[in-house]
Every structure is written in C-alpha cells, then in structure tokens.
Image: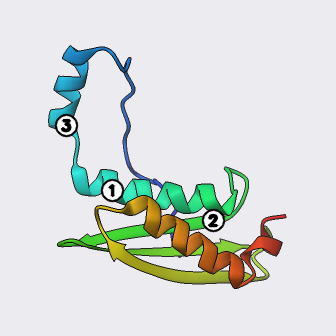
Amino acid sequence: MLPAPGQGALAIECRKDDTDVLSMLAKLNHRPTQLAVTAERALLFHLGGGCLVPIGAHATIRGEKMKLEGIVAEVNGGEVVRGVGYGVSGEPEIIGKKLAKKLLKMGAGKLLK
C-alpha cells in the first residue's frame, strides 16, 4: 500500500515577497522531504489525477539517488497498475514525469477515467 502523494508532509505558505518570513521558513525546510514531495506531486500532475482518484506515491532518497514508487487503482480496487522510477534526487520533477509516462503505458490511463 502506498500513501497519497505528499501524505504526511507539512507546508507553510507566505507571500513571495515577504523576505523576513521566507528567511525564517528556509531554516525549517527539510530538503530531502521537499524533493520527495516534489517527485510525488509531479507524478500526480502528469497522471492528471486529483483528490478523487486512487493514486499512491512514495519517494525515498539515499544519497544522490531517488526511488519513486507509484500506483494507480480503479475506484473499486479491481485493477491496479504499479511501477517504480529511479533518478537523481535533484531532479524530482523528471522522475515523477517519467514514472507517470511509464504507468500510463502500462494502462493506468483507463483507470483514471
């Protein structure tokens, strides 16, 4: 079982021009979590999914390498398409996009309708 993309991560929003708050928030940012969530959300975006589609994702980082696991299921759980993508941890969007394309080639697109 894989969690929803970004599950468990916390985010804080602020105005993009508020340099004082941005400076404080930068100290709280955990870069590996940011990279993992970015990959998971890129997968979701490139699959075209949203909150109502059963899509799971989990990214893990070891050194400079990232592993992204993804799953797309029918709403009733009948059919499931699952895959794994790998890449450089500093390129999370690319990893998410490549895994989305792989899952779509494996038939995930018909489960998203």
Please tell me which residue is depicted at 14% across the width and 35% down the height of the picture: 27
Q: Is residue 54 visible?
A: yes
Seen from the viewer's position, the closer of residues 61 and 65 is 65
Q: Are the residues tagged 1 and 3 within 8 Å (C-beta)?
A: no
Badge 2 amino acid: Ile
Q: What is the image's colouring?
A: rainbow
Q: What residue does disc 2 label? A: 55
CA gap, disc 2 to disc 3? 28 Å
Instruction: Indicate whether 18 appears above or below 95.
Output: above
Q: Is residue 74 visible?
A: no
Badge 3 amino acid: Leu
Badge 1 amino acid: Leu
On the image, which quarter does residue 39 sit in? bottom left
Q: Position of residue 22 (x, y in %)?
A: 24, 24
Q: Position of residue 96 (x, y in %)?
A: 49, 65
Q: Position of residue 29 (x, y in %)?
A: 23, 41
On the image, which quarter does residue 65 sit in? bottom left
Please tell me which residue is depicted at 30% across the width and 54% down the height of the picture: 33
Seen from the viewer's position, the closer of residues 105 and 111 is 105
Seen from the viewer's position, the closer of residues 56 and 44 is 44
CA gap, disc 1 to disc 3? 14 Å
For the residue carrying disc 3, how many other residues have a C-alpha within 10 Å: few (<14), some (14-19), or many (20+)?
few
Instruction: Indicate whether 14 appears above or below 11.
Output: above
CA gap, disc 2 to disc 1? 19 Å
Q: What residue does disc 3 label? A: 28
Q: Are the residues tagged 2 and 3 within 8 Å (C-beta)?
A: no
Q: What residue does disc 1 label? A: 35
Please tell me which residue is depicted at 22% across the width and 29% down the height of the picture: 25
Instruction: Indicate whether 89 appears above or below 15.
Output: below
Q: Position of residue 26 (x, y in %)?
A: 20, 33
Secondary structure state at the residue bearing disc 1:
helix
